[in-house]
Image: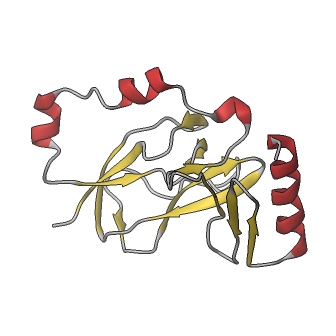
Amino acid sequence: MELKEIQNLIKFVAKSGASEVKLEMEDIKITIKTGSGKSETTIIQQPVGSQMQLTSPAEVPSQSAAADAGGASEGSADENSKYVTIKSPIIGTFYRKPSPDKSVFVKVGDTVDAGDTVCIIEAMKLFNEVESEVSGKIVKVLVDDSSPVEFDQPLFLVDPS
């Protein structure tokens, strides 16, 4: 199955209003899940059992970019160890505001509860809300507005105490 066919399938499912579609072929299995207020997740399971997040070809991370993201200094890791990191669930473009004329979802010093929306990530023209998994105070915003983000990239530091 070509990437273009998969992208067309995603668009079709998004327009249809279906909450979940599973497609199994001889060598791949595709599951597309959507829901009101929840982020869309599209997973391709390869025969070896590994999982890969599906995005447009321009957004696929390179191996060197993934290696660079993991190279944080140990000094900053020690001081940040008491904080909980909110990470990107998908690859896309990070936005701090729901629209250009609105205010940011959260800023440094704001208190968030579990389930509060902290940002939006756009992937393939779909806007996915990222919710905090922990209650606490925003200590640091790690990504600039309108920047591309990788899967599992740290976005915010939250002090849970």
Front one among 10 and 138: 10
Q: Residue at x 56, y 48 (%)?
A: 52
Colour setting: secondary structure
Reply above or below: 147 against 133: above
Disc tally is 0
Q: Using the image as rendered, state which of residue 77 and residue 44 is in the foreground.
A: 44
| Residue at 9% in and 40% down | 78
Q: Residue furthest front?
A: 26
Q: Quadrant of residue 38?
A: bottom right
User: Residue 24's x, y, as percent?
Assistant: 74, 65
Across and down, in percent, residue 66 comes to: 43, 30
Which quarter of the picture shows residue 4? top right
Q: Is residue 127 left or right of residue 13?
A: left
Q: Residue at x 70, y 47 (%)?
A: 100
Along the line of sight, the residue nearer the viewer: 67 or 97:
67
- Residue 118 appears at what percent x and percent y? 48, 59
Relative height, residue 114 to residue 117 (above, below)? below
Residue 147 locus on image (x, y percent) = 57, 34
